[in-house]
Image (cartoon, rainbow, N blue to C red):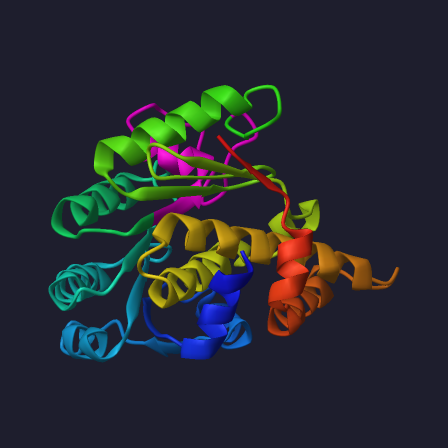
Amino acid sequence: MREYLERVRETSPLIHNITNYVTVNDCANILLACGGSPIMADDPEEAEEITSICGGLNINIGTLNQHTISAMVLAGRKANLCGHPVLLDPVGAGASSLRTETARKLLEEVDFAVIRGNISEIKALAGEGSAARGVDADAVDAVTEENLEQAAELVRAFAADIHTVTAVSGAIDLVSDGEKTYIIRNGCPIMSRITGSGCMLSAMTAAYITANPNHVLEAAAAAFCAMGLAGEIAEKRMKPEDGNSSFRNYLIDAVYHLQGETLEKGARYEVR
């Protein structure tokens, strides 16, 4: 885990983000905190040009319109031509036809290194049917110790089917390339009480896989462990008068200060 974090800080990868306007500032800040560098451009007139100068691309469908959909396709294709890794965050897939169809269109037209979503979104894309509740995973779909094997097999099968690392965040995180699956238990419940923790994780994962292009599965798992551990560190800073807004700031601070040795010691995962 340590080497993947340190590689991000050594190389400071420039990540192009076509992301939603709810969390765009948080995505920029988490990239700076983890050691990367952000740029945001969602106009089709410049999407390809911006992508060509970046190391990686993060596509997030959280606030879609026809304007940004075109930019996503153009940028994704350009990144593929440049050999840059691309991450898809299918926010709210299963919640509306537009979101689900856009995610599937992107999967058809762009080669993604990683798909990063919650379990409801991945189930929707896998055609399993989900209980998506807006942009959040429904409690019915949540990964628990009781259904862990079933959930891990779903994620593993989906990753194998689309030949893309699939990374699912939740109380228990799952990151799989279709053969090897990381089961990660870092994190804390309050992370689900701030808008943008998932979007930030996607941006950070994009930085990790861009800095470690030959180890996409391991780098994605390291990003998940790093974010979860940062959440644990942030929670320990909470005072009785603090709320979710304070936690958000503590989380970004924790990512900023996280060192490779701390991640190596604090990462809680197993590989199946």
**Which of the 4 image quadrants contains residue 135?**
top left
User: Vertical placement of 152 versus 175: above or below?
Assistant: above
Residue 91 appearing in the image: no
Q: Which residue is drawn at 72% across and 62% down?
A: 234
| Residue 7 visible (yes or no) | yes
**Residue beneath the point at 49% across and 57% down:** 201
Residue 147 horizontal/vertical position (percent): 55, 20
Find the magenta span and give its range. 115-140
* Above or below 107: residue 139: above
Residue 225 falls inside the magenta stretch: no
Residue 158 percent across, percent down from the top left? 31, 31
Camera-side residue: 217 or 191? 217
Q: In this view, does 216 lie to the left or right of 137?
A: left
Comparing 63 with 269, the one in front is: 269
Is 117 contained in the magenta span?
yes
Q: Nearer the viewer, residue 106 or 155?
A: 155
Locate the N terminus and report the quarter of the image it occupies: bottom right
The residue at the point 61 percent across, 19 percent down is 146
Coordinates of residue 116 in the picture (x, y in percent):
39, 48
Q: Image check: 219 left or right of 162?
A: right
Q: Vertical placement of 131 versus 174: above or below?
A: above
Q: Position of residue 13 (x, y in %)?
A: 37, 75
Residue 226: image quadrant is bottom right
